[in-house]
Amino acid sequence: MGLFDSLRRDKKAESAITNEVVEPAEEQPEELVESPDEEVVDETAGEEQEALEDDLAVVQPIKSYADKKPVDHVVGMTKIIAIINQKGGVGKSTTAINLSAALGEQGKQVLLVDLDPQGNATSGLGVEKGQLNACIYDVLLNDVPIQDAIIPDVCPGLDLVPATINLAGAEVELVSEMARENRLKDAVGTMRGKYDYIFIDCPPSLGLLTVNALVGADKLIIPIQTEFYALEGVTKLLESMKRVKTRLNPSLDIFGILLTMYDGRTTLSRQVAAEVRNYFGSQVFETIIPRTVKLSEAPSYGMPITQYDPSGKGAAAYSELAKEVVNRG
């Protein structure tokens, strides 16, 4: 169900009620009153009623992990990758959704963990948050097994651990918890061997949720938009990564730097891309994600770009990125 479906449903319901206006009997034409056998059909009202009934159809219950389709290939060594940047609006959720879906369509088994209280990855995959029985908040703070929060097969080869607004309070609640930095690591660690890739969509901050992601991940993908202030905040992120690597997660390292929102028509985009490549060298992916309208539209329809616009530039870019991720091992 699309992000705006509830708004459309309310609007259509209001329209249907408004159209149900019955004229007083005495004002009807005489021939209608004297000819009861003749039926007057309001085709417009019928179409609106049919559309309204479709929109009000019963929502299918969300599947549980037990309903997951059998895996048709041998899963290799699981790679847990956090998609992270403390700066907002750089394409973290867009990349999390579309890279996960692209890998799933290429035959990989992928689990996407939505760790952002805004839940953009959840709504962007068409999941109704009001239908959820459990989310990542329950996994981190209520000791719910992660399998109980997994929604299987939201796309081919892609499962999701959703997030709701409840996660906004997790930063404060985790402060008093034992082993607070290891909550996510312990949860996702139980899924090693069941997925080829586990991606963590991180919030735009360096709080406890992000620290959990840094501790739980093997590698990092850092999206950087090709715009002014592109490297703003990346220095602090790298400092945080080094502290976590030294004290909590020795294997943590950068898997790749991803250039996003690229517009080759502008000098600024080309200059920023060159600057990032000069700074990070071979860590930068060859694939560049372009700025397209379709990439912005897809989440409102609850679909990854590979389904919403499979022949477009955005889908082609994320398919190429998925191949590059596989090739990097």
Image (cartoon, rainbow, N blue to C red):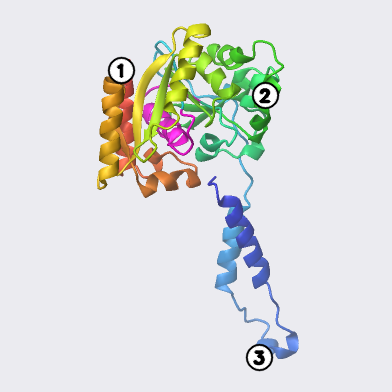
What is the three-letter code of the residue carrying label 2?
Asp
Q: How many marks?
A: 3
Image quadrant holding the N terminus, namely top right
Q: CA distance from mark 1 to mark 3?
A: 77 Å
Q: Vertically, is 249 above or below 85? A: above
Q: Which residue is mark 2?
A: 138
Mark 2: secondary structure: helix
The earlier-in-sequence mark between 1 and 3 is 3
Q: Which residue is mark 1?
A: 328
Task: Give the number of the disc on residue 29.
Answer: 3
Q: Which residues are magenta?
A: 85-112
- Nearer the observer: mark 1 or 3; the answer is 1
Measured as percent of width and height from the top left, residue 216 is found at 52, 15
| Foreground residue among 194 and 327 | 327
Label 2 crowding class (10 Å Cα cut-off): few <14, some 14-19, many 20+?
some
Task: Give the number of the disc on residue 143.
Answer: none
Label 3 crowding class (10 Å Cα cut-off): few <14, some 14-19, many 20+?
few
> CB of mark 1 within 8 Å of CB of mark 3?
no
What is the three-letter code of the residue carrying label 3?
Pro
